[in-house]
Amino acid sequence: MVVAITALVLAMVGTGYAAVNLPKKSVGTAQLKANAVTNAKIKNKTITGKKLNLKKLGTVPSATHASSADVATTVPPNALHVVGAPGEPPFTGGSSNFGSESGLTLPGASFLKDHDNIVHLEGVVRVGPSGPVGGEIFVLPPGFRPPSGQIVILVANEGTFIIGGSNVSIMGQDLSGKVLTEAEEPAILTGISFFAGS
């Protein structure tokens, strides 16, 4: 038992002596086994950019697209949709663009969806005859409507506007995607915005 304890003490003292008293620069690449130096064994802030050969690092696997992303750009909004233009939603319910007044040409009805999924209406319109829920201006296509089953009611520009999501009906009238108003002429759409959900 005494021999075992003596051997243990000598083994512990011997490694402590070797670790403390190694001459400077006596351990190098030749003395290190492969993968002997791990992240856990490297003291923080001891390896800096000046000590790295960046040309040997290569591309990080999860950032292979980074070489083509030198310049950040903002996400542009979707294209402007002009109501009544070819390939765009037509006016409905007898509504139309207001046009000119006293030599001033007013902007026509249009809409767009921005990168935050907000739909913005623009323009000044003449509203056709009012129905049970209001005068119908045009129908928004899917993707530009409020959430399904919901309507947006806004009081703006001296009028009340109702915008239907998909699958909405009131008083027997299908309001899916419809933009309606009780506004006096001209009805001003500019400044009306809502979250697109259907």
Image: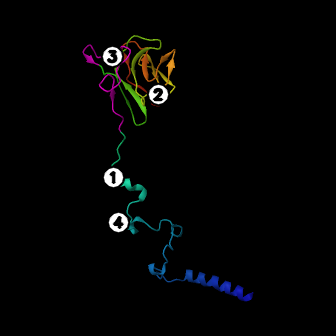
Secondary structure type for disc 1: helix
Question: What amino acid is found at the position of numbered circle 1 in the picture?
Answer: Ser
Q: CA distance from mark 3 to mark 4?
A: 64 Å
- What are the residue bounds of the magenta stretch? 76-105
* Residue underneath mark 3: 96
- Mark 2 Cα-neighbour bin, 10 Å: few <14, some 14–19, many ≥20: many
C-beta proximity under 8 Å, tags 2 and 3: no
The residue at the point 53 percent across, 70 percent down is 41
C-beta proximity under 8 Å, tags 2 and 4: no
Image quadrant of residue 9?
bottom right
* Residue underneath mark 4: 55
- Give the main secondary structure, helix, strand or loop, of the magenta stretch: loop
* Residue underneath mark 2: 146
Mark closer to the chain start, 1 or 3: 1
Residue 68 circle label = 1
Mark closer to the chain start, 3 or 4: 4
